Amino acid sequence: MAALVKAMGWASRPLLPVVQTWDLDARRWVRALRRSPVKVLFPSRQEVERKPDAGKQPRKAAAEASTHVQRLKQPIRVPPSQTPSTWEESGLRYDKALPGDKRLSSVMTIVKSRPFREKRGKILLEGRRLIADALKAGAVPQVFFFSRLEYIKELPIDKLKGVSLIKVKFEDIKDWSDLVTPQGIMGIFAKPDHVTMTYPETQLHHSLPLLLICDNIRDPGNLGTILRSAAGAGCSKVLLTKGCVDAWEPKVLRAGMGAHFQVPIINNLDWEVVPSYLPTDTRVYVADNCGLYAQPQKSNKASDYGWMCDRQLSKFHKYEEEEEDPETGDSKGWLPELEVQNYDLDWTEAPAAVVIGGETHGVSLESLQLAESTGGKRLLIPVVPGVDSLNSAMAASILLFEGKRQLRLRAEHLSRDRSYH
């Protein structure tokens, strides 16, 4: 009975896991086999140092060795130059515009307000190509608005130092832009000065003794196209008198396709200072828009030729009344008398300046007086009877490229004469 009770007592106890000592010893020996001994002690107390195998190195030593090998495999780095070559090396930073950012409102102010542009001396450029042309010519940027970082990374890094870089949403640029498909980048620049600008070497090499004077050109698209033609023909400079649209208006910039940074443009001039911008012995020629078949008509009224702007007509009519001949009733010759010649006859024997007037207001009296004082003429582009005068941009292109043709022929004749001698 006692034996039975003893057996039940053992059965009531909870069973505990039994760990065999041989299992612990086996694990210990397995770990030992994985290690590389540093010394071996024999029963005779002899010590033998064991060197690690070539292919088996301690973990720390192996890691250091692999790092050293990787360094050897890397190409030798040349010390960086003073000018950073990548965006990361330059350390440039940009801000993200938040709703209500006051810097964004200045964009529309510059776009819409000519007095603001002239007072603050700032202009707005849009598009990667136009901005790149401006930077190449030496224009000074102040702020860039962009929707994607790669648009900024395309620009020269050395030109971006000190410039505010602001990342905005593309929807915001789309709201500000006049383009059908905005390019995602806009820049505010200091208004360029033709004296400090750096124009392309090819443009300077092909520059001709040919100058353009814009008078009362008030359509932005026409003025931009005229500037583009002037750059293509190789004009030495373009003068804009008061009464013309602002050459740095966004629509003019867009129509000019980079011509603003290829040919010197001098804006908002009074006629009194125009002669100071002309080379010595320059003859001024006026584009005639009365047409070939209107030429025989004799009239001293500027309005009959579509030449005079409205703001001057009242003054001119007063002169007509004061100088009217009592016997014949005709007004005296207060209008400068300029000889008329076809545009394709030679008129580039001396440095020439061509005056182009606007389609609505025409050229001013001062341009005719300047042409008369310099020995210039009226250049006539014949048109078919019944057809209105040519577009101002078209007339300017015809005259400028005709002048280029005449100058090229003259240079060929001179080189041929020198070769004979």
Image (cartoon, grey):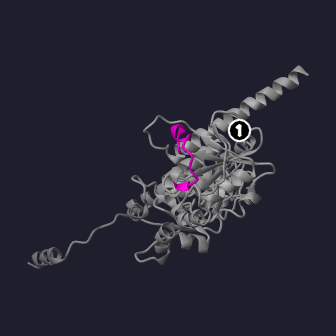
Q: Quadrant of the N terminus?
A: bottom left
Q: Label 1, on which residue?
A: 347
Rate crowding at label 1 as few (under 14), some (14 to 19) or many (20 or more) other CA atoms within 10 Å. Answer: many
Could you say which is closer to the camera, residue 148 or residue 327? 327
Res. 151 visible in picture: no
Q: How far across and down, in percent of the image, does residue 323 sit?
A: 62, 63
Q: Residue at x 71, y 51 (%)?
A: 372
Q: Amino acid at mark 1?
A: Trp
Q: Residue furthest top?
A: 420
**Secondary structure category for the residue under label 1:** loop
Could you say which is closer to the camera, residue 184 or residue 212? 212
Q: How far across and down, in percent of the image, does residue 134 sit?
A: 62, 56
Q: Is residue 104 above or below residue 333?
A: below
Q: Is residue 298 above or below residue 178?
A: above
- Is 292 part of what is drawn in magenta? yes
Tell me the magenta residue range.
Answer: 290-303
Q: Is residue 376 above or below residue 265?
A: above
Q: Main secondary structure of the magenta part?
A: loop
Q: How far across and down, in percent of the image, does residue 336 sit?
A: 66, 53
- Is 161 part of what is drawn in magenta? no
